[in-house]
Each structure stands twice: as structure tokens, then as C-alpha cells.
Image: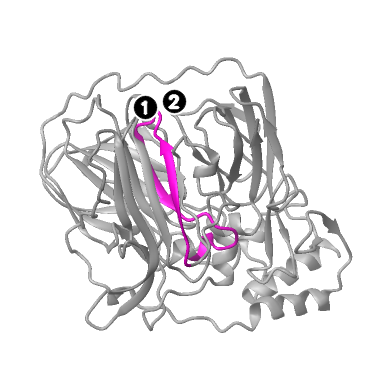
Amino acid sequence: MKRRNFLFNIAAALSGVAVTKAFAKMNDSTMPGMACEINSDDCKTGEMGDTNMNMNMNMNMGNKVSQKLLATSALPQGLDLPQLPRLENTSNKQGIFEAILEAKPVKLKLTQDITTEFWAYNSHTPGPVIEAFEGDDVKITVKNSLTQATTVHWHGLLIPSNQDGNPQDQIPAGSSRTYEFTIPEGNAGTYWYHPHGHETVAEQIARGLAGIFIVRSKNDPLAFLPEQHWFFSDLKLTDKGEIADNSMVDWMNGREGQFVLINGAYRPKITINTATRVRVWNACSGRYLNLSVPGCDIYLVGTDGGLMPAPVLLNKPLLLSPAERAELVILPKQSGTVYLQSIGYDRGKMGNVPPEQDIILGELVLTQSKSIHLPSTLRVLPKLGQATTSKYLEYTEAMDMKEPRGGMLFLINGKRHDMQRIDLQSKIHEIEEWTIFNNSHMDHNFHIHGAQFVVVSHELNGEKKPPEYVALKDTINLRPHEKITIKIQQNMSGLRMYHCHIVEHETLGMMGQLMVK
């Protein structure tokens, strides 16, 4: 099919009007005219008639009645930031954390008139906070009281692959399993847990299954500071108060609800009356957070893999793609009330979508505080030597008229995820250099299980730059046509997943499998 007709028919199916700015930005290398079989790894360029393309687009997308969403004024605002419950440790032995976690449907009353069925851990969404120490032996029994299989992925923790909730290790509906692992020394940090089932992760996270996992150090240089937790998630409700289904735009761009929640609350009131350590999670399915905290000095002290070598004073909003975390020290420089915001960030969405706008996330009640002396050294990062091998990943997007969830595929090295295929192999303890190339028109991110990495360089528009700061990461964003080079070492054998953590893109193919031997 000629490219002009290809783009015209896509745009007609998406908006019924004209080619949108997202498609106008594509070129032949990023969005070729492809006809991809839904169960095939091969995308073959073919001549499809315009009528057939429109027919398939209409059959897959156009006949679904759009859902009317609940007005944002329907939920209460300005309530105090909730303190999330903690998961009870039932062990009385030092160095052992033992608990039960149950995933089940639960009806929660959001207002006097709105009761919503969520899927939740121990009847809470977000789920209860798990707190353990470096070196602890963890034993958590997960009961699956859902109507579909699930897993629990302990996101970011360096644990054996057979305990990490891979999609191959699902817990059938009505069953349970016990996860057992030891938290390595040096693994203190800000982590979380969520499902990672095959073809179900997008729905299960959207319905509320996610929670905090904090690993503490016995020698924490910031233990003297008060601490807050900001766990961001999206909630998309119909006008009946039900969890909304994914729309075509959700599948293409990543789900974004009309409510951005912090600890399950909509636009809560957050009080900061002294220098405060704040752990931040972007647990949204597809939303990027570009955090702005006015009236304060903001020090970045930690990322996905725990504390950084030294504090970094931020001079711009902090961008967190889905699944990224950060630790901040917030020092109020004035007294009064300001708004915590996410500043609009254009990540190149597809379709007829509105421009990105600033979003109010919460109300900050500040008390001006004296300057604080933070330790100049927070941590010494483990040294990775010279890489002895390299790997290359390329992100692309393609049309698939047989794919009912948006008509798009998201691919790595031209292939969609296949549970039966090993995509890459690594030798245990070998130091590797990976280059990830986002050869597409929109932002995607990269997450890998079982290891943390350091960023070596960013390359965009022919210009290569070092990272802004040195830190351990497990998730990193890539802008359109950006290449990122990382250095990484896998220190446990077994099967590991790597994928975009926009969970709709992961579900639609942007995931691969690494075997470590």
C-alpha cells in the first residue's frame, strides 16, 4: 500500500478527520506500511486494499461504544494524605519477614453515592506497605482469590528468577504460592510489587493491584529525617463508578485515568513543616509524571536502586516514567499553600488526543524551614569493570489489523513477546553493555528484571551525552529516536524479562526474555 493512503486510513480510523500530529511526525523508518499476523513474529510489508484496512479498523475499534467517564468533581479533594497500612510481619524471629498477601475483589466506598469494585491486596488499594531490612529472609504467601491467574513481581529487588513473579510462573485462580527469597546486602531502596501475569497485567494494575516494598539499611545516612510516601497511581472510572475498560487510545498510548491519586487519594493535602525525606513511586500504567514542587529546595538523593553517591539539587521538574522511583529531600523555603503539579510533557502520543497540560496533583501546606546539612556522601556504588560483551535492542511500532486492542503492535528487534522464545542469553556475572534504541515517534521506557544498571550515555540527534547524574536504575525513559547505553551485570541464573513499562505496550508485545546461565 502506498504510504500516503496508509497514513490517511489510520488517521481516519482514529479521529475521522485528518492525519494527526503524531502520525505526521512519522517517517518510513519508524512506521512502515506493515501487515502483521497477530500470532507471528514476522511483520511483512504487503499491499492491503484501502477498503480492507478500513474494514478491519472499524471491526476492531469503531464499533465499541465509548464509555462516559465520571466527572472529576465527583471525588472528594483536599483530604489529608493517607498513611498506608503496613503488612504485618507474623514472624517473631530476628531477620525473618513472614506474611500473607491476598489478591481479591473488594468493594470500596469512594463517596456516599459511589461504591467501586477494585482488585486489591488485603482489601487495600494501594496494597499494604512491606518493610524489611537488607539481609532479611522473606517468606510471603500469596493467595489468589481473583477469577484469573496472577503473579506478584517484586519490582526492582535482586532475587532469584523463580521467585520474581515471571509470567511463566502464574498462580491459578483459587490457588496460592509462597515466595521465598533473601534480600541482598546493599539492596536498600524504594521498590514496589505488582502483578506480572501473561496478558493480564494491564487489567490487574488498572483495577488496583500494586503496593510499596521498602528495603531499609541498618546504616541509613538519612534516617534522621521524617519520611513521607507518595505512591502515584491512575484511576479511570465510568459515570457509574465502575473501573473503565481500556479504550483504543489507552492501548495505543498507555492508560491514563481522569484521577491521579496519591496513596489512593485524589488531590490530597500534604503537610511539610521541616526538611522531609519523600519516597516517590510512579505506579501509573502509562502516565508520565513531571513533578514540580514549588516553594522548596528539592534534593534528589535516591533512584530505583537506592541512594545515590551524593545529593543533587534539582533545578527543573523531575520526570518519572511509569515504574520509576525517586527519593527526595524537600526543604520548604516559604510558608503557605502551593500546588504539587505534574508539568505537561509531550511524549508523542498517537491519535486525536488533546495537548498535554499541567495537572494539579495535591495541595502542599508548607512551613518555612532552616537550611539543612545533608551528608556529602550518601553511598559508594558498586564498581562495574570493563564490559566484555554487548547487546542491542530496537523498539519499533507496527499496525496489526487483527489485534483488537488498538490495532497496534509494539516490538523489540522486530518481534513481539513470545512466552516460548528465549530472545537473549547472558553469562552469569559477565559485565555487559546494552544499547537500547527507541526507533519510534513516541517515548517508551526500558525495565529489566534481576539486575540494576548504570547509564553510560544518551544519544539523540547525533549528539552523545553522559547522564546528568550517576545512579543505579532498573527503569529508564527513552525519547523518540534516542539511544541509551547502559552497563549491567546479572548475578543470578535463570529467566529474566525486559520490557517497556507502559503496561499496555508490554502486553501488546514490547517485552523480551533473557536467559542467564
What residue is drawn where x is 28% and y is 75%?
73
Tag 2 or tag 1, which sits nearer the N-term? 1
Q: Is residue 352 above or below residue 159?
A: below
Q: Is residue 273 above or below residue 409?
A: above
Q: Is residue 257 visible?
A: yes
Percent across and percent down for residue 454 are 51, 28
Answer whether residue 352 is visible to the viewer in this image: no
Residue position marked by numbered label 2 in the rendering: 470
**Residue 15 as seen in the image, left or right of residue 359:** right
Q: What residue lies at 65% left-to-right and 80% top-to-bottom?
A: 62
- Look at the picture and state if 253 lies above or below 412: below
The image shows residue 25 at horizontal and vertical percentages of 66, 54
Q: Which residues are magenta?
A: 174-203
- Please, what is the three-letter code of the amino acid marked with disc 1? Met
The residue type indicated by label 2 comes to Val
Front one among 307 and 51: 307
Q: Residue at x 33, y 58 (%)?
A: 126
Compared to residue 331, the image places residue 267 above or below, namely below
User: What secondary structure is marked by label 2?
Assistant: loop
Q: Residues within 10 Å of mark 1 (few under 14, many from 20)?
A: many
Residue hosting label 1: 308
Pinpoint residue 281: horizontal percent, then vertical percent. Answer: 36, 47
Q: Are marks 1 and 2 in contact (CB under 8 Å)?
A: yes
Which of the 4 image quadrants contains residue 226? Answer: top left
